[in-house]
Amino acid sequence: MGKGYRFPLFPANGLAATMTVSMVSLTAIYATSTGHTEYVLQALVPVLAKQGITVTLRRAETCAPEDLLVGDALLLASGTWNTGGSEGQLHVHMDALLNHRAKDIELREKPCVLIALGDDRYYYSCRATERLMQFVLHHGGKPLGSPLLMVNEPYGQEEKVRKWGEKLAILLLAA
Ligand SMILES: Cc1cc2nc3c(=O)[nH]c(=O)nc-3n(C[C@H](O)[C@H](O)[C@H](O)COP(=O)(O)O)c2cc1C
């Protein structure tokens, strides 16, 4: 990853110089019902964009398995739901993508970043993070950094997203 493009610079003193600009693309696939997960991503995108990272947002229900392979890195974001009748599961659209349509995908060591949402009133609070991590590990992905866990409503937690995003940008640019 971290494709570096070298641009020639022509400073006033006439000496030749070059500047390396990193171009990294991240495909962020997410599912949401309340809009919470989307809100977190909307807070994250400008933080990454500021560091030159291009983010393509995709809703899980519109994705085919091969969409997980697009871009330099993959971000998966899901709230924790009672999909299938028991709590602690992925959002139904993320579950349908990862555990059904893309159940045979090979991620080929692709750097994978995770965001999980949940609520501390539930026993399996934020368990989506484990479901997402299991998917990445079982399909040959390479986890990048620590997952972002958003417990309870994301409103008012923008600073947490910003700090996590800044660390993520460093990892993405170095990977
Ligand atoms: C029916 C239902 C089941 C839920 N189950 C869990 C759960 O098992 N664990 C948890 O931490 N949060 C649970 N939540 C909370 C959601 O994960 C949380 O509200 C999240 O922010 C929703 O974001 P989203 O709409 O973007 O998916 C549940 C919410 C609902 C309405």
Image: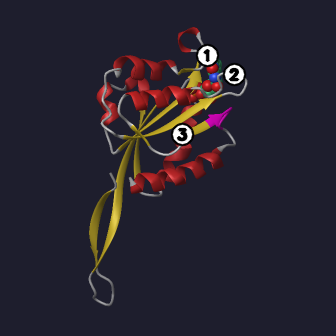
**How far apart, in angstroms, are the residues tagged by discs 3 and 2?**
19 Å
Instruction: Identify the residue at image location x=53%, y=42%.
Output: 42
Q: Quadrant of residue 85?
A: top right
Q: Is mark 2 within 8 Å of ligand 1?
A: yes
Q: What is the crowding at mark 1: few (fewer than 14 residues within 10 Å), some, or many (at least 20)?
A: some
Q: How far apart are the alpha carbons under marks 1 and 2?
A: 8 Å
Residue range in magenta is: 150-154
**For the residue marked with disc 1, what is the amino acid?**
Glu
- The local crowd at label 3, few if under 14, some if 14 to 19, many if 20 or more residues have their Cα within 10 Å, is many
* Label 1 or label 2, whichever comes before in sequence order: 1
Report the residue marked by disc 1: 87
Callout 1: CB less than 8 Å from ligand 1: yes
Could one spot residue 59 in this view of the protein? Answer: no
Give the structural element (helix, strand or loop) at label 1. Answer: loop
Label 1–label 3 contact, CB within 8 A? no
Q: Quadrant of ligand 1?
A: top right
| Residue 125 highlighted magenta (yes or no) | no
**Residue 165 visible:** yes
Q: The disc labelled 2 sits on which kind of residue?
A: Tyr
* Residue shown at the point (71%, 28%) measured from the top left: 120
Q: CA distance from mark 1 to mark 3?
A: 20 Å
Q: Give the left or right position of residue 96, taking residue 131 as reference.
A: left
